[in-house]
Amino acid sequence: METKFRTLYQLVFLLLASCTALHASANSEDFVLPNTVTEMRTELDVVNFDLKDKKGRIERLKILLPHAEDLAKKNEDNAGFQMMAGFYNAQYAGYTGGVGALKYAKAARKYLEKSTEIDPSLYGASAHSVLGTIYYQVPGWPIGFGDKKKALKNYQTALQLSPNGMDANFTYGEYLFAEKKYTEAKTYFEKAKLAPPRKERPKADVYAHETLQKYIAEIEKRLSK
């Protein structure tokens, strides 16, 4: 199960990475809690890029997670706050792993589904992309709530809403790769490479393109056998 949640963490890391100004010093023990969606995204950059120690990341998220959920409750009609609460829970599930991570995966699902009800296209339909991966990576009944049909539905919805987007094509390509549909996966990975650059997220694009190239190289290797 830890491997599955680690994959979930990697996806959220990809979707949330950006290079906006840091909201707080990575070395500061006292930091100002983020109170806007933009600040919450930025704070996750601090966790992912500036805190090198896994224990430090988890400790930081222990403080941030309840705050993110509190903001979501106070802004029930705001898709961004719901999405961030979902992302923070998914992030925490990814870092902690194990059976205990299911609790946070469930919370992530709840917030992300609410976000899609309010505005499914927000941030390139990222909520649907992450939901797809949650449903795909989390074990199914009787251990968890994983569901391949729901995973596929979310991936396809993300593609419908953001047909040329990086996240939608990247995550669907990963799904196809995991299902050993390599030729189809390569098509979506190539499409993801052609996605318009995200000026506010160059670090995410660099990380994504490096990962895409590794996937494509691996697919070509497997198909040549």
Image (tube, helix red, strand yellow):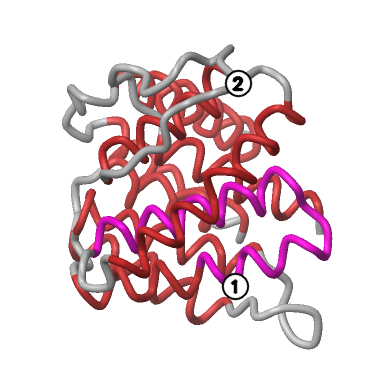
Q: Which stretch appears magenta?
A: 79-108
Could you tell me residue 79's position as x and y percent? 24, 64
Q: Main secondary structure of the magenta part?
A: helix
Q: Is residue 92 magenta?
A: yes
Of residues 183 and 200, the one drawn nearer to the viewer in this rendering: 200
In the image, residue 3 above or below residue 104: above
User: Does residue 207 show up magenta in the picture?
Assistant: no
Compare residues 24 and 117 and report the one nearer the observer: 24
Which residue matches tag 1? Answer: 106
The residue lying furthest to the bottom in this view is 142
Q: Which mark is residue 29?
A: 2
Q: Residues within 10 Å of mark 1 (few under 14, many from 20)?
A: many
Mark nearest the camera among 2 and 1 is 2
Element on which disc 2 rests: loop
Q: Residue 24 in the image: x percent, y percent? A: 43, 20
Q: Quadrant of the N terminus?
A: bottom right
What residue is shown at x 52% (from left), y 44% (from top)?
64
Secondary structure at badge 1 equals helix
Residue 121 appears left or right of 110:
left
